[in-house]
Each structure stands twice: as C-alpha cells, then as structure tokens.
Image (spheres, grey):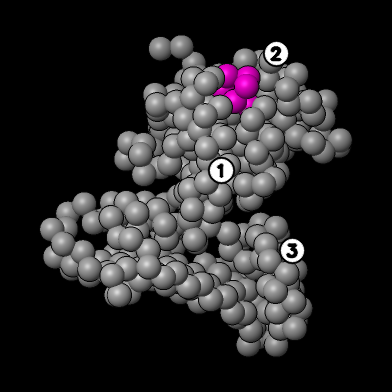
Amino acid sequence: MSSIRVVQFGLGPIGQACVKVLVEKSGIELLGGIDIDPQKIGKDVGEICGLKESLGVVVRGDAEAALAEWTPDVVVHTTTSYLGDVEGQLATIIRAGAHIVSSTEELFYPYRRDPEFCRRIDQMAKQHGVAVVATGVNPGFAMDILPLCLTGVCTNVTKINVRRVVDASRRRLSLQKKIGAGLTPEAFAQKLAGGHFGHVGLRESAFAVMETLGWPVDEIHEDIKPVIAEERVTTPFLTVDSGQVAGLHQVMRVKSGGRERLILELWMYVGAKDPHDSVEIIGEPLLSVRLAGGIFGDTATVGALINTIPKIIHAQPGLRTMVELPVPHAFLGMKV
C-alpha cells in the first residue's frame, strides 16, 4: 500500500503537535504545512514545530496554490472552532480533491446548527469525490462516541449522564483563556453575554447522542457558570488569584418524550481536583465507567485526528460524522 499523502493545515499548538506524530507514522508522507502567520510562511515545518531536524517541507500561506502543487490525499485541518470561520478553508481543500479531518468543534455534528452550511459542504464534497469529518476528544470522543459505544451492550437505555472534570492548568494558553481563567466574575459575565465564549461543542455532542439513539429533542438547555478560585493557582502561562475565575462549569440537559434523557456536565478550570471522565448509562444493564485522571485533551485530540486519517480515505464522499465511521482505534504504524 502506498503512503497516504498528508498536509497539515493550521500550525497552532494542536497543528504542531499533529506534525510531531505524523512524521513518526509509517504509511504517512507529510507534504507540507499551511498557515496564515507571516512569521511561519517559508520556514521548514520541522523548525516551526520545534523538531531537532528539518523535515525538508515548508509552510505555505497560499492554500489554493500549495494544495494544487502538493495534491494531498488528506488534509488535517486545525484552525478554529466555528463553522462560519472555516467554510472558505474547507471549500479550498475540497476543490483540491483532498479528504478532510478537522478539529473544528462545530463541524463535529453540524446539522442542527447550520443546515445550509451542511448542504453546501456535503454537495461540494460529493462533487469532488472526497469526505469531510470533524473529530477530537470533546466533541469527538469523551462525551459522545464513548457513551454511544457503551450503549452497544444495552438492551434498553433510559438516560445517560456524562461528567468530565478537567484540570485546565495542564492545557494550552488558548484554552485557559477560552474558559475565562484569570478574569474577574464581572468580566466573565460580560464575555458570556457577548457569545462565542466557553467550551464549544457540547451542543454538537448532545445532538449526536440523542439523534443516534433515536430520541427526538423536545427541549435542550445549556447553563454556563464561572468556577471561582479559592486559592492562588499558577500555570505555565498565567496566575489566577483567589476570587478570580478559574474556569467554568458548563451543563447541557436534554429532554425527550417529557423525560430528561441526557446530561453532559463539564467542569474545566485551573487547579481542578480529581480530574476524571465518567459515563453512567441508566438502562439494562446499568453501566458506570470512570476514567481516573481523565483523558488528556490535547494529546487525545491529536490522536483522534491522526487515527481518523486511514478511515476517511475509505469513507463515502460527502459530509460525514464520527458516528458514521468505523469504531475509533489507534493507527499504530510507527517508523523504526
């Protein structure tokens, strides 16, 4: 089998982490990177990613020209969280005839958020014979694919409770800022009122679970509150004093048929005690699973993206979701 030709689109922290794993995989040929940062354009991808050796492939700023020259099989897309910000990027990749594996949270299960966007991307992808999918750890695994897999041994399910507690002090600066670490409670409230704040993707996870299980969504309610630090917490990037916001507590509750069917509860803050992921299936049989220490989000996101590359190659053209693809598993081919 010939190598899968891959381009990394977006060289922020997650994109750089993807490169470091991609170059270690047998069966993968990294063709180059794409980024809009003028400080990165023209430099070797290995240099940008902090590797000890140059990779002999460069960062380009003109995505259309670069993709036309490189002709990749798959593009790993790691730029931003929102559909409205990525449609042009996705269209450029699709027109180049490449499959897409993206980390864009709203793309994980976008049908309820923007049906017209979905129609446009699906139609374009089918026209060019490629597939588009978004994945990650949350959304993409911890609060959607994992609980759905657990229901695979149930004869009946009446409710699902998912809880994720994340110590954000171990995560990248952009995530710490996204959850409001270091803000005053008043500034947190202002940002929340302005929109595009907090964890992105809980809504997508909720609809993916509900619609896969055939539960019509009658009512969906999201609540986001600040977690206030009780003591000073210092991370590699910032310091949060007692009384400041350490992060957030975000809960999605969904009803179907007059009953609460799904609770997705996320605690994400710097200094979180007892980080873990847990899933409780109320059904037959009753299942309760707890992952002590939790799933480390940055590494898991990279793993989810790269492990999906071989699957997207064989997917039916169009806009796809992780619910439709084969069961996730590690892509272990390592260079020796």
Going from N to C along the chain, the mark reached first, 1 or 2, is: 2
| Location of residue 14 with respect to 207 vertically, above or below | above
> Residue 76, percent across and down?
58, 33
Q: Which mark is residue 116?
A: 1
> Which residue corresponds to mark 2?
69
Disc 2 to disc 3, C-alpha distance: 39 Å
Picture quadrant where residue 214 is located = bottom left
Q: Is residue 66 a member of the stretch shown in magenta?
A: no
> Residue 15, percent across and down?
64, 40
| Location of residue 202 with respect to 13 vertically, above or below | below
Residue in the foreground of this view, choosing between 172 and 10: 10
> Which residue corresponds to mark 3?
237
Question: Which residue is drawn at the image coordinates 68% and 20% (left, top)?
Answer: 67
Q: Is residue 149 left or right of residue 170?
A: left
In the image, the segment drawn in magenta is: 93-98
**Which three-letter amino acid code belongs to the residue tagged 2?**
Glu
Going from N to C along the chain, the mark reached first, 2 or 3, is: 2
> Residue 291, percent across and down?
36, 63
User: Judging from the image, what secondary structure is the residue with disc 3 in?
Assistant: loop
Q: Which mark is residue 269?
A: none
